[in-house]
Image: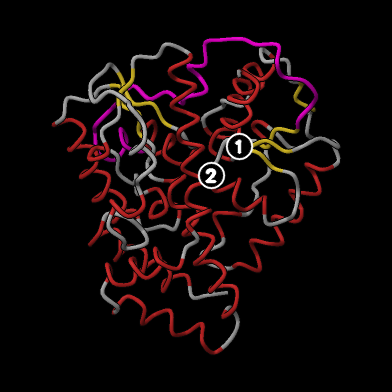
Amino acid sequence: MYNPKDIIDLIADNVRKTRNPFGMPKFLCNRWWQDSSMPAEGDALLFTGLMYQFVPYIEKSTRYLEQFEDTPWADYVHYAKYVPNYLAGMGLALLTPAKEKKRFNAILQNIAKILNRSNVDFFYRPELDDYSGILLYDLGDQEGFVRHAEFVAAKLKRAGVKTLITVDPHTTYALKVLYPKYTGQSFDVKTYFELVNFTSKNGHGRVTLHDPCFYGRYLELSDVPTKVLANLGIECVPVRNSGLFTSCCGGPAESISPKLSKEVLDRRVKELQTAGAPIVTMCPICLGHLEKSGAQVEDLATLIVRCAA
């Protein structure tokens, strides 16, 4: 296991100086919208929190962490914060496969298609779409989280944003629960799948729904994707640990201990595979981590778009 303080200090330094945990310029990682024709004005801002965009970089950096965990080299993580942030971030961006970036960008494009199909009056402005800071909160840097959250909330308020459409559980929890508590700024926050407003009979078969911790335990939204999929003709097979009692996939622990994270992953995948159906999740961190097990995993948005075609 790495020294948690070294990891926290590195991430906090990146967020403080570059507004994201990897230290890279936002224009390098947030490109999914460039080939889309989304309006710049509307009732609700589509706010990705950059989480889907970050997953390819998380996967790449985790591979390096796996190599050096529990070796003498692990102590050198402490010195990484002395490398210029943008230099390290741009290096990571160049090392990360373009294919993976394109794959996760496609999920965000599918979410936009779902909102259009549901006649949602939404808009997207990349300059307003920022990382929520949730990892700082998860790792215990409450002061750093609050400082960053105040920056993000103030920018949204200045732009007159009142309603946000989110795409992942981490960002949703931050904006819906933590921002009002720690910044005093409140927004009307809805996940994209709560806004699905169409049915189809093109879907068929059964899937196993993995409930991300924030959606299942804290926001109690597990029943919504189940209903959405039922309206598309897809049955969700019950899982022993789900909803309020869902089990973590282990993804959030990767930055501290890839080995511990894998142990948690193996237990969760075993639970999910007892249902004997393909796994579906609605969290980019869960998706990237569950795929490491070799199991058949698909993002909820991808499945909805395919069944609605």
Under mark 1, the amino acid is Asp
Looking at marks 1 and 2 on the same chain, the residue that comes earlier in the sequence is marked by 2
In front of the other: 166 or 185:
166
In front of the other: 142 or 286:
286
Q: Position of residue 178 (x, y in %)?
A: 36, 38
> Circle 1 is placed at which residue position?
299
Please report the residue visible at 28 percent of the width from the left and 51 percent of the height from the top. Answer: 27
- The verdict on residue 162 being magenta is no
Q: Is residue 83 above or below residue 37?
A: below
Q: Quadrant of the C terminus?
A: top right
Outermost left residue: 158
Q: Position of residue 278 (x, y in %)?
A: 77, 37
Please report the residue visible at 75 percent of the width from the left and 25 percent of the height from the top. Answer: 236
In front of the other: 73 or 102:
102
Please report the residue visible at 54 percent of the width from the left and 66 percent of the height from the top. Answer: 62
Question: CB of mark 1 within 8 Å of CB of mark 2?
Answer: yes
The colour scheme is secondary structure
Q: Residue 284: which numbered mark, if any?
A: 2
Q: Quadrant of residue 157?
A: top left
Q: Is residue 204 left or right of residue 32?
A: right
Give the residues in magenta. 178-207
